[in-house]
Image (cartoon, rainbow, N blue to C red):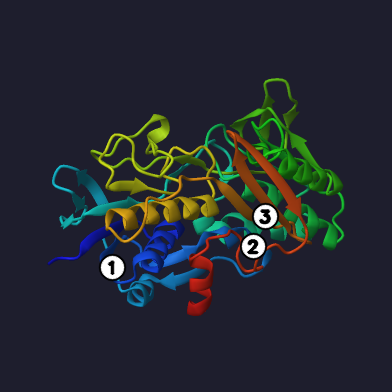
Amino acid sequence: MNRFRVVICGGGIAAIEGLLRLRSLVGDSVEATLVAPNDELRYRPLAVDEPFARRGVRSYPLTKVARRTGAEWVQDAVEWLDPNAQAVHTTGGREIPYDALLLAVGARLARPFEHVTVFDDAHADEAYHGLIQDVEGGYTRSVALLLPVGPAWLLPAYELALMTAERAGSVGEEGLAVSVVTPEPAPMAALGEGASRAVAGLLERSRVRLYANARPEVPASRHLLVTPEGPDLEPERIVAMPRIEGRPIRDVPSVTGGFVPIDERCRVRGLDPHVFAAGDMTDFPVKHGGLGAQMADVAAAGIAALAGDAPEPEPLRPVIRGVLHTGAEPLYLTARMTDGRMESEATTERAWPPDEKIVAEELGPFLRTLE
C-alpha cells in the first residue's frame, strides 16, 4: 500500500519547521515532498546585523535538509491547487498528489513609498551598509526609519534605529538624529504593553525620536510628512520597511491583502481539512518567523492526526519569542495571546540560545547540527 503522502510548499522557516515537526511526530511512516523554488533555506532574521559588519543571514542547502529528513525536494513553485483531485500544480508543469498539504510559501514585499530606500532582508547589506559608513564618517546627520500602514515586520525598524544610534555614539558622532515614524499607537504595540514599554524606554535612552500614530508620506527626496498632525521633516536618509502582501495561489481562498485565512488549527478556511497554511502568507495580523514556526507545528500535528499516527492537536495558542538587537545588550521579548489580547514581557537576561533570533522548536536544534 502507498504511504500517506504529505506535500509541503515553501522553502522558508515555517515550511522546514513543519517538515521537522512532522518527522518528530510520525517518523518515516509518511511520504514527504518539499516543493520550493529556492535551493537554500535562508535564516533571514539576522539580516539586520549584516550592515554593521556582524554575521548576518545564514544559508543551508535544501538538498542537505531533504536528505537529513528523508524528504523528496522538488525545485519548483506551486502555481495552483486542485482541491477536488488533491493535487498541487507547479509553475514547471508538475502535478503532485497529496493526502495532506501544508502551504508555507511566505509573502510578497511591496515598496510602500517612493523616494526612500527599502530595507529588504534579502539585500540588507546593500541597502544599509553605505548609510552606516556615511554615519561613521560624519557625512549623514539625520536618518528616519518608516513603518508603513498595514502588515510589516516590526522588529527590524526598531533594531536599525537603535543600532544606528549606538554605532554613531561609538564613533563619536553624537549629533546624529534618528527618528522612527510608525502608524502604531506605541512602539511594538502589537506585542502588548510589556514589550512596548521596554522598547519605548530603549528608544528614549538612545535619543531616538518616535512619531507614533502617524501615517508617513514622502512626497520628494529628503522630504518626510508626519501626517496627520506631525511636523515636516527633512532627513538626509529615509529608510522604509516593506509592506507585506499575500502571495495568492489559484483556487486557494484569500482575504483582503491576498492573505490565506486559517482557523485555530491552521487549516485553510473554505477548503477540506487536509489543507493547512502557516507563516506570513496567512491572515494572522502579526508577521513573525517564530509565530510562523508555531503555526507549522500545529499544522504538522494536524497532518499527523490525519495520517492516523497522533491524536487531534491542540489549537494554536500564539506565543511570540524574539530578540531585539540594539547594538549593545539584546532584549528578549515574549508575547502571548490571552483572551484575544497580547500580554508580553521583556528581559535582558538570555532567555534562549543567543544564535536563535526567533524560537522555532524543531528548526533551532536542527540547524545547529548542520553548522
In the image, taking residue 197 as reference, residue 96 lies left or right, namely left
Q: Residue at x 54, y 36 (%)?
A: 114
Q: Which residue is mark 1?
A: 73
Q: Earlier in the sequence, mark 2 or mark 3?
A: 2
Q: Position of residue 171 (x, y in %)?
A: 83, 63
Counting other residues with Cα less than 10 Å from the Cα at mark 1, is it few (<14), some (14-19), or many (20 or more)?
Answer: many
Label 2 secondary element: helix
Instruction: Report the Cα–Cα distance between label 1 and label 2.
Output: 30 Å
Closer to the observer: label 2 or label 3?
2
Q: Which residue is mark 3?
A: 131
Q: Secondary structure at mark 3?
A: helix
The answer to whether marks 1 and 2 mark residues whose Cβ atoms lie closer than 8 Å is no
The span from disc 2 to disc 3 (Cα, nearest Å) is: 14 Å
Front residue of 53/212: it is: 212
Q: Residue at x 69, y 30 (%)?
A: 185
Q: Nearest the camera: 5 or 212?
A: 5
Tell me which residue sits at (63%, 49%) in the image: 155
Mark 1 vs 2, N-terminal side = 2
Residues packed near mark 2 inside 10 Å, few (<14), some (14 to 19) or many (20 plus): many
Q: Which residue is mark 2?
A: 49
Report the amino acid beneath label 1.
Trp
Residue nearest the observer in this picture, 217 or 290: 290
Q: Is residue 191 above or below residue 232?
A: below
